[in-house]
Image: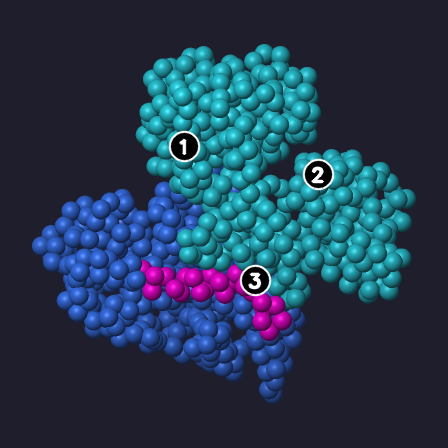
Chain colours: A blue, B cyan
Amino acid sequence: MNDLISKIRNRESKIGIIGLGYVGLPLSIRFSEEGFKIIGFDIDEKKVKLLNDGKSYIQHINEDDVFSMAKNNFTATTDFSRIANVDAIIICVPTPLDLHNEPDLRYIHGTLENIKIYLQENQLLVLESTTYPGTTEEEIVSFIEAIHNSKLNFTIGENYFVGYSPEREDPGNKNYTTKIIPKVVSGYTDNCLELTKALYDQIVDQTVPVSSPRVAEMTKIVENIYRAVNIGLANELKMVADKMDIDIYEVINAAATKPFGFTPFYPGPGLGGHCIPIDPFYLSWKAAQCGVDARFIKLAGHINTYMPEWVVKKLTNSLQKEKILFNKAKVLILGIAYKKNVGDYREAPSLKIIELLQAKKIKIDYYDPYVPTLAPTRKYNYKMSSVKLSRDLISKYDMVILVTDHDIFDYDLIKKNSKMIIDTRGRFNNKKNIIRA
Amino acid sequence: MNDLISKIRNRESKIGIIGLGYVGLPLSIRFSEEGFKIIGFDIDEKKVKLLNDGKSYIQHINEDDVFSMAKNNFTATTDFSRIANVDAIIICVPTPLDLHNEPDLRYIHGTLENIKIYLQENQLLVLESTTYPGTTEEEIVSFIEAIHNSKLNFTIGENYFVGYSPEREDPGNKNYTTKIIPKVVSGYTDNCLELTKALYDQIVDQTVPVSSPRVAEMTKIVENIYRAVNIGLANELKMVADKMDIDIYEVINAAATKPFGFTPFYPGPGLGGHCIPIDPFYLSWKAAQCGVDARFIKLAGHINTYMPEWVVKKLTNSLQKEKILFNKAKVLILGIAYKKNVGDYREAPSLKIIELLQAKKIKIDYYDPYVPTLAPTRKYNYKMSSVKLSRDLISKYDMVILVTDHDIFDYDLIKKNSKMIIDTRGRFNNKKNIIRA
């Protein structure tokens, strides 16, 4: 173990990072900046090729960083036998929900199967994927301890080490980079914790050790539950304020002047991305297993999931008020991405909004410079491309609906030329032809 | 109107403050510091006498401040005819809930009846009490406009002015005094807003004008809903963590190291005080009237109200585990006040905890230096006084339950001499004879 610690400190250890997406890629770049040798593993051959060519496939990740990493100390591969050559393995695979909104650990299980026969004594394995409390112990520790073959027999904490350290990436947030964000670290045993901490101490300014993987797993989920619940609350308050003819944005901004005890959260057309709409259900599922009902999580889920419908209802009510038949109506959606200034549209509410509008035979176009074309997702298969925004074009639509408030949008142009705007982001002032939704 | 503004700016206007409690008293002191003449109105003759004698009856309000105010420019009275002599009237009366958890505006109505025949043209009347959106317009404006008599006929915005400016007091918070906390101001008309703003600009560093009393009313309630919901969430997460054998305080403190997007809230034995347990129901009541269900408010209410029971269950489970019969058990409650370092026990969960323990025939004492004796409340009538804490005394109790974590408590003494501690505040480390609840 002490050997491994000094190899880590002297940058002589080789790091294997499994899953080269929104978490694994910036993590690889960070290790590369600190002079480590990194092997990046992914099952997607296209990604592997792009990265080895020094190209970034994530809009907010700088191509220069990928290029310099690929030139210096990083190789991507689909060949999991190379796990045998690394000192530390970090798993950054997705942890989505299945069709019943229950944890889907297939990528973790798949990874363990892929690496199983290549594991070596005295490696450190760390999971970064967000998951319910107990996963590291129940899934990873037991899996590794169950491996018996002619030469190997692992005892965690003695000849193999397992840790959990949740990712805290905030894609597109330039104030908080991987290096600056404090990192929670944990280990299955004291030795495991010491090694995990030593590893991350090389690449982040501050590690935060906690007493068990369970605590670290819960920590990450609690962070995202806090967001899901407070966004849900903002959405509920939006619906209440709407009935009372009160501008919820004016209320939230006034409340935000309280210098203590209040943090503003804003309503919107619904949750998106790979964290906030998903992670909370990992805890509610586990809680149910333990016989407790996680009611806040469920309520936030209900309200946030309802938002696209509510927004569409505001839009269709306005069409009816204007006496425009749905099958003659033309609507322009502004913004497809799930949050502003990024191109990521995983779980984006815009996709659901399109579905709901199309079901009513309303003709739709969209404009989003970060999403030139809509690729098929697990749920949807739209054949659409972004329009090019112009004065003439805007004025042809009966309604424009602002779904994602990218900063690059020309809001003046939009305001001046739209017949009517459905504003789900509070970006426009509450005026005659602006409808808050 | 301009006359009134210049009178205010030149400190020539006389201010009438109705309701001299947790809000009205510090507000009177603040106006007094700025050199205004103040008449304080209250229906409680005892309070009036104490204040005129320069004495404070609220533990965290400095007696020197009251003394100097009474000496210089403040008189308290129960005689509402003196309303005729003031330029501005500020109403700071309580807005509690009735037995059905619905808004009880009796103190506002009582005040209006008391002052009705003494109102004069060109007065400014401002409500500070927390209440549901619409109150100022529906209750105050209509009441005043309905006053017709031989000489008077009020038109709000022309010869009478009505505003709403929610109090934002945080009793005992020394970092944020009345002067420093920005104050939301609103008026029924533009003139009303201008006057209300001019008045408060004299005593606070920053006023925050909003477009209507309704928005200002909603703002204050949203601030407190945010707290009630997040404390409710922390309490739910506490119950979930408890089942998973996870220390919720370790989790919250680890999550709090995230430098963006997370604000820590801590669980506890239940809500107390005059704001957080009450205000949210003002909105849910009004929302129901408008046909919307405020589900987050209700859920937070359920969970927070359930806390005393949950805490008592943890205590009685421990007694059973230790094989101590309830009717032989002796329990010491540490802290009666609803929050630390104050003596206020309005709506405090300790009162409910005493009720639940006594119903099980458990013998109870309490220790709280800020609450020497328990005066009768609307719901409870306990004849108890605080014990004097000593090594010998503590060791006589089967269990000690920390309900309020006052900083003046001698935690070392408590820890060393208690047989068992039920800790509802996460103040003690999770050890063998410490039970988190």
**Residue B35, percent from left and from top:** 51, 14
Return the residue nearer the eye: A10 or B386. Answer: B386
**Furthest-left residue in view?**
A392
Name which residue lies at 68% across and 27% down. B57
User: Is residue A320 placed above or below A145 in the rendered structure?
Assistant: above
The kind of secondary structure element at disc 1 is loop
Q: Residue at x 38, y 77 (%)?
A: A43
Decide if residue A207 is in sight here.
Answer: no
Given residues A286 and B270, the one toward you in this image is B270
Tell me the distance, in whole angstroms, between the alpha carbons under discs 3 and 1: 58 Å
For the residues labelled 2 and 3, say whether their Cβ atoms are less than 8 Å apart.
no
> Please, which chain is the residue tagged with disc 2 on?
B
Give the residues in magenta: A287-311
Identify the image quadrant of residue A329.
Answer: bottom left
Element carrying mark 2: loop
Labels 3 and 1 in the same subunit: no
Residue under numbered circle 3? A218
Q: Earlier in the sequence, mark 1 or mark 2?
A: 1
**Are there few (<14), some (14-19), or many (20+) residues within 10 Å of tag 3?**
many
Name the chief secondary structure element in magenta: helix
